[in-house]
Image: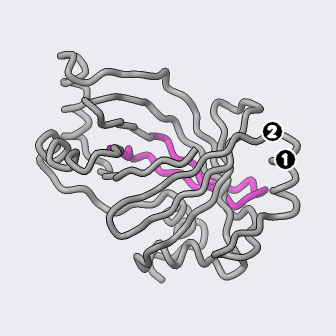
Amino acid sequence: MNIYRQEYKYIKNVKIFSKIVNFTNLGFIKEIHNKRMVNSIYFDDFHNTAFFEAEEGIRPRKKIRIRNYNKSNEFFLEEKQSFSHYRSKNTKHIDNNLKNNLIFKGIFDKKLGMIYPKIHINYSRRYFLFDEIRITIDENLNYNLFNSNIIYKDKFSIIEFKSSSHNSLDKIINLCNEYPVKFSKYCEAYKKIYNTNSV
């Protein structure tokens, strides 16, 4: 399944969080899913190309991950690409055996070549809907190198708006009264783990 959309993010924004809660209480925003844990394994090549391209803002660029929810045995292979004016996400359901095989042998990608599991990220996520705009709130982020027991934590919230409509930005800006920021969980995890603030 391939999805084309725009994404807008806000970090540690108590004012916007309060607006979402207030609009939910008033019925303008609906909570559409129970809160759940998101677990993601991000893949990259030996040169960490996906990380550096994201940090430098190169487009098109790509991230590949395996994701599951609430520690279930249902897994998804996801490929996210960023272009000049939109992003796409292709999601494929995979079973536990294929997941283990991809982790053990790596994945061949036409752009990145052979890529391997690098960083594991998990966090709690809530889901909302405002008109055609999907809103997620991520909290309690944990990062670690794949197969490492050393965990790095972030306690701030990430509020993300996603929509396939090109007219959604005005609605988001009107709701938030602020412009979005650039943020990548994979890049943030990489910088914390390797103790670097820049590339």
User: Residue 95: which numbered mark, if any?
Assistant: 2
User: Magenta part of the protein: which range?
Assistant: 139-161
Residue 25 percent coordinates (x, y) = 22, 16
Residue 104 percent coordinates (x, y) = 87, 59
For mark 1, give the secondary structure: helix
Q: Who's the residue at 43% across and 51% down the image?
A: 4
| Neighbours of disc 2 within 10 Å: few (<14), some (14-19), many (20+) | few
Q: Of residues 135 and 132, which is closer to you in this image?
A: 132
User: Residue 98: which numbered mark, if any?
Assistant: 1
Q: Who's the residue at 57% across and 72% down the image?
A: 50
Vertical side of 4 occupied by 34: above or below: above
Magenta stretch: helix, strand or loop mostly = strand
Report the side of 177 relative to 157 (left or right): left
- Per the model, the C-alpha gap separating discs 1 and 2 is 6 Å
Vertical side of 55 occupied by 98: above or below: above
Residue 153 is covered by the magenta coloring: yes
Q: Amino acid at mark 1?
A: Leu
Q: Of residues 51 and 163, which is closer to you in this image?
A: 163
Q: Of residues 11 and 86, which is closer to you in this image?
A: 86
